Image: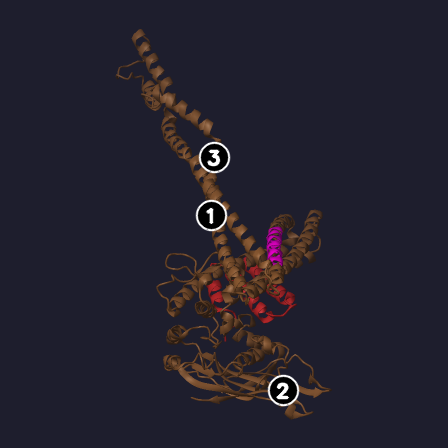
Chain colours: A brown, B red
């Protein structure tokens, strides 16, 4: 699906603008060039406003300002003016979809009012084989728009270059996991499972004629389900608070980092390095503790059974030394001889004479001696295993002592670095530069709050898991109870179908998450190594099991924290585009200020590789003159289909911009 | 036009689930997609209709 054109009337600085987009591959790139503040980001906002009714990329400086062009409003005097954004898409079969969102304004008593007040729902027209269908309004129109680009996935199609630079700094493993979750549309499965569980409960709730035991279980289930819902709501709230605290902590730390006082800036940088070091030490501690636990699990049975094992070994060895194991003759052999009435030498021992009975008694003695013969092989094999276990456990104390020594060293190192962190904090607090003390106190306050909330989140998650187990057990109990009476057969069938649906949905979710994560990692890593200019420095991009992103250098050391702004931007661009490509949605990509943070030589490299990397996708780049150098233009020339420039000027009543076609 | 992510549909199709479960998941996903973004979606009737239809269908097939 490509954008055919966008028409804008009275939106922000645009009074009238129509932009037709390049479509046919290989010339599927549209370049829109404009100075800072000319209206590039507001083009991105016009697109998201038209599609989702929200300006998703609004600059802080525009927040609170009217969405309607104020200069046009001034010209209209007391009349009504219309704000319109219209986007026409072309589907792969050539059929078009036209989406329009509009608002009307007038000035009344010095205030700007919407006429009539509304939330500006979208209107949609759709081309079919015969004719255009529509207008389609409200939720039906929104449904069709969501199937072009779901609003939750918007940021993987409409990128803001400046924000991308901060993407990995601001995003935790949880955010990245959510991104993978969103891009795979797995939210749909999450709600599906939730709704299916609720329907299941409802079926049980409405069932009449239950036995008194089933009634009791049902009542229990209702209480547990209600508490489970409350727990989940509380968890959501805690997660939200944790994120807020984290953002606030980061905000104050950024203030310290961007401080004009060089000493503070330096201290803050030291703190970042120290924290990264402590985090690595902590990882090593966790690894060693896990090694120790594994060692304990492996040797504990032998340690507990050491004495009996040793005694068994001594007994078996004693029997062997006495020649009882293995016995001289196998019991079965002796039994056969006695049955046949033969001696070991072959002579007959069936006679009742002295010779025969003496020989028979002798042969019977061999049988008594060979009583252990049936298990002698097993005893000998077991003795070898016992020997191995005993030898293996001999090294255990030394292993544990070594691990404990290493752990003690690491704990000491961690404490030492934590002390250094405290000293830094103290030093920052003693600063006489205005605000510094308060910023440090604030960052500490929110940092502590975040840590406390993390613990609360973990506890709540454990509660939810525990309650989930109780609910599962109650459900099984209820099913057993219902099966006792045939009148509940239909209910049992409904519940079984719901259960199977829930289990299957969970399986699909797990399988997709795994596949998508792997695919995103492979694609992002490949793209990062293609776009990055220091090719010999980095190994690629890695997403671990907790969805934390790392960029190991060739020696395997983590380098994400040391990337330059430009490298970070390339890293984020690779990651976002990888998410985009695995999303399954064939929507156009618009990137605002894609090369803003990147220096000259790497810019050319990116411009050369970007078209191959986004092959087959309609791409629009919103660039400044500084980004769009002759070299970049030359590198992109093979794919550029349309080229525009934004001219803008300021009037007394506000800004005006127009878009001029260059090519 | 893509309705539900093709990867999801492909995973369901290629799974070893029974046809009833495949139908159930696809039908319920379509409802979820339609309700997506709705803060209090009315899904109950749609869910009940699909679940009951499939359960009845399964029962009549078993009776045969």
Q: Which residue of the protein is positioned furthest toward the right in this rendering?
A: A109
A237 vs A298: above or below: below
Q: What is the chief secondary structure element of the magenta stretch? A: helix
- N-terminal-most mark, 3 or 2: 2
* Residue A301 disc label: 3
The one nearer the camera, A617 or A546, is: A546
- In the rendered structure, which segment of residues is drawn in magenta? A444-463
Q: Are marks 3 and 1 in contact (CB under 8 Å)?
A: no
- Label 2 marks a residue whose chain is A
- Residue A643 is left or right of residue B47, and the answer is left
What element does badge 1 sit on? helix
A228 vs A71: above or below: above
- The residue that mark 1 highlights is A287
Callout 3 and callout 2 share a chain: yes
Q: Is residue A461 magenta?
A: yes
Percent x, y of residue A39: 54, 82
**Label 3: few (<14), some (14–19) or many (≥20) C-alpha neighbours in 10 Å:** few
Q: Is residue A565 magenta?
A: no
* Residue A70 disc label: 2
Percent x, y of residue A194: 60, 60
């Amino acid at each position: 699906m490509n954008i055919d054109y966008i028409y804008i009337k009275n939106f922000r600085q645009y009074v009238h603008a129509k932009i037709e987009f390049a479509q046919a591959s290989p010339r599927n790139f549209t370049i829109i060039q404009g100075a800072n503040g000319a209206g590039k980001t507001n083009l991105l906002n016009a697109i998201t406003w038209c599609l989702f009714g929200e300006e998703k990329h609004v600059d802080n400086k525009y927040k609170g300002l009217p969405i309607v062009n104020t200069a046009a409003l001034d010209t209209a005097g007391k009349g009504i003016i219309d704000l319109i954004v219209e986007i026409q898409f072309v589907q792969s079969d050539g059929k078009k979809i036209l989406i329009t969102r509009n608002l009307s304004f007038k000035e009344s008593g010095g205030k700007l009012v919407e006429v009539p007040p509304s939330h500006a729902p979208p209107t949609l027209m759709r081309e079919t084989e015969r004719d255009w269908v529509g207008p389609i309004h409200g939720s039906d129109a929104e449904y069709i728009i969501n199937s072009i680009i779901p609003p939750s996935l918007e940021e993987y199609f409409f990128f803001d270059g400046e924000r991308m630079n901060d993407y990995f700094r601001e995003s935790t493993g949880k955010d990245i996991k959510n991104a993978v979750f969103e891009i795979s549309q797995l939210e749909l499965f999450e709600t599906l499972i939730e709704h299916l569980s609720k329907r299941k409960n409802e079926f049980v709730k409405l069932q009449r004629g239950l036995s008194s035991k089933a009634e009791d279980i049902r009542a229990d289930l209702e209480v547990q389900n209600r508490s489970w819902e409350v727990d989940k709501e509380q968890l959501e709230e805690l997660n939200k608070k944790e994120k807020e605290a984290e953002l606030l902590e980061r905000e104050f730390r950024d203030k310290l980092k961007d401080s004009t006082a060089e000493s503070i800036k330096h201290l803050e940088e030291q703190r970042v390095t120290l924290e990264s070091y402590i985090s690595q030490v902590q990882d090593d501690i966790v690894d060693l503790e896990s090694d120790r636990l594994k060692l304990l699990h492996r040797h504990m049975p032998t340690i507990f059974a050491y004495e009996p094992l040793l005694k068994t070994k001594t007994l078996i060895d004693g029997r062997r030394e006495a020649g009882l194991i293995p016995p001289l003759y196998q019991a079965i052999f002796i039994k056969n001889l006695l049955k046949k009435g033969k001696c070991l030498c072959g002579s007959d021992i069936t006679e009742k004479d002295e010779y025969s009975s003496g020989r028979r008694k002798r042969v019977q003695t061999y049988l008594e001696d060979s009583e252990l013969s049936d298990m002698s092989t097993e005893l000998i094999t077991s003795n070898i295993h016992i020997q191995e276990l005993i030898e293996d456990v001999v090294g255990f104390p030394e292993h544990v002592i070594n691990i404990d020594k290493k752990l003690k060293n690491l704990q000491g190192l961690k404490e030492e670095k934590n002390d250094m962190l405290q000293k830094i904090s103290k030093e920052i607090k003693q600063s006489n530069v205005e605000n510094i003390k308060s910023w440090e106190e604030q960052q500490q306050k929110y940092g502590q709050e975040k840590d406390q909330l993390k613990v609360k989140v973990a506890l709540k998650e454990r509660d939810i898991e525990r309650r989930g187990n109780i609910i599962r057990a109650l459900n099984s109990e209820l099913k057993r109870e219902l099966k006792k009476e045939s009148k509940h057969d239909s209910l049992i069938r409904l519940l079984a179908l719901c259960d199977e649906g829930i289990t299957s949905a969970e399986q699909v979710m797990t399988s997709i998450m795994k596949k998508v994560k792997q695919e995103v990692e492979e694609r992002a890593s490949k793209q990062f190594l293609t776009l990055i200019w220091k090719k010999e420095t980095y190994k690629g991009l890695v997403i671990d099991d907790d969805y934390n992103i790392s960029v190991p250098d060739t020696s395997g050391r983590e380098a994400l924290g040391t990337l330059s702004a430009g490298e970070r931007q390339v890293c984020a661009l690779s990651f976002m585009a990888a998410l985009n490509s695995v999303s399954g949605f064939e929507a156009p990509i618009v990137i605002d200020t894609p090369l803003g943070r990147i220096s000259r030589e790497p810019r050319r490299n990116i411009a050369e590789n970007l078209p191959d990397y986004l092959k087959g996708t309609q791409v629009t780049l919103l660039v400044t003159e500084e980004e769009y150098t002759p070299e970049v233009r030359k590198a992109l020339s093979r794919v550029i289909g349309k080229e525009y420039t934004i001219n803008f000027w300021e009037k007394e009543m506000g800004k005006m911009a127009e878009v001029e076609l260059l090519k | 036009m893509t309705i539900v992510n093709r990867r999801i549909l492909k995973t369901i199709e290629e799974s070893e689930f029974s046809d009833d479960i495949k139908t159930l998941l696809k039908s319920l996903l379509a409802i979820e997609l339609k309700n997506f973004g709705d803060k209090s979606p009315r899904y109950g009737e749609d869910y009940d209709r699909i679940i009951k239809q499939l359960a009845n269908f399964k029962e009549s097939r078993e009776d045969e």
